[in-house]
Amino acid sequence: MKQLDFWFDPVSPFAYLAFERLPQELVGVSYSVNYRPVLFAGLLKAWGQKGPAEIEPKRAWTFVHVQWLAHRHGITLQTPAQHPFNPLPLLRLALACGHAGELPNRRVVEALMRHVWCGAGADANDPARLAALTAELSPRRDPGGDDVKGELRACTEAAIAGGVFGVPTVELGERRFWGLDSLEMLAACLRGDPWFDGPAWDAAAAPRSGVQRLSS
């Protein structure tokens, strides 16, 4: 059985779509998944990137694109009233559902994702909705506790140290597959496509000299 690490933040519509698509893409493959919450904003800061919603034409395209992808794959997707929103309450709730050091299971992650993306356009951080979600999941620990906050920071730091720069990212051994559109590539790797046994991956990823943008 192959072990996968699925790095996610429910603020990302692509992470939601990849979460929903993963079982279909990997039909017939023996695998298990560690669902690892990570603060996407922390990744952006670490790598010096802007999020899609911070560039207006990219924000508009992103939501057109994800609506099309949801339609294409038959997945319900309803953009929340506020986006981007602060995902920290949801990320901490995910970790609080387990004992110290435990990762959330698929049922917990599904509840978080669908709270955001299947909420009929409601605010993901509406206090009444968050209270209802918390009651539904019955966390073992206080989502606002220092231990839970520390675990989320540690998860984010581990992701950055491992080279994770965006969500969703699925790790298989030392290889990382980023984005919804990489799930087909991940499936091919898991099914033994010989391309992954040769030098193609490392050769493609090798650094190349090129023009560097000057700082202003």
Image (cartoon, helix red, strand yellow):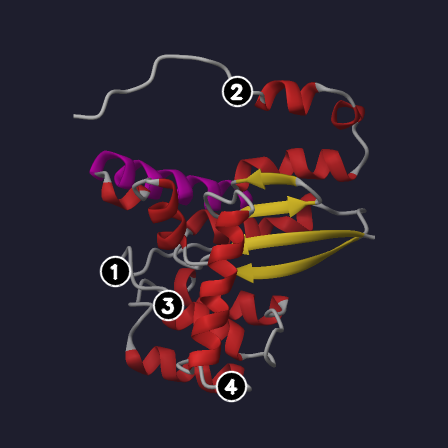
Tell whether position 202 is magenta: no
Q: Which residue is mark 2?
A: 207
Q: Which residue is mark 1?
A: 82
Residue 80 in sight from this viewpoint: yes
Q: Residue at x 59, y 70 (%)?
A: 104
In three-dimensional space, the C-alpha distance between marks 4 and 3, rounded to whole angstroms, equals: 15 Å
Spatial CA distance of label 2 from label 3 is 35 Å
Q: Is residue 197 left or right of residue 49?
A: right
Which residue is the site of mark 4?
141
The C terminus sits in image quarter: top left
Where in the figure is residue 169, as x and y percent of width and height? 55, 46
First in sequence: mark 1 vs mark 2: 1
What's the CA distance linking mark 3 and mark 1?
15 Å
Mark 3 vs mark 1, foreground winner is 3
Q: State yes or no: discs 4 and 3 in contact (Cβ < 8 Å).
A: no
Question: Looking at the image, do the residues carrying marks 1 and 2 touch, with CB atoms under 8 Å apart?
Answer: no
Q: Quick one: label 1, few (<14), some, or many (20+) residues within 10 Å?
A: few
The residue where tag 3 is placed is: 88
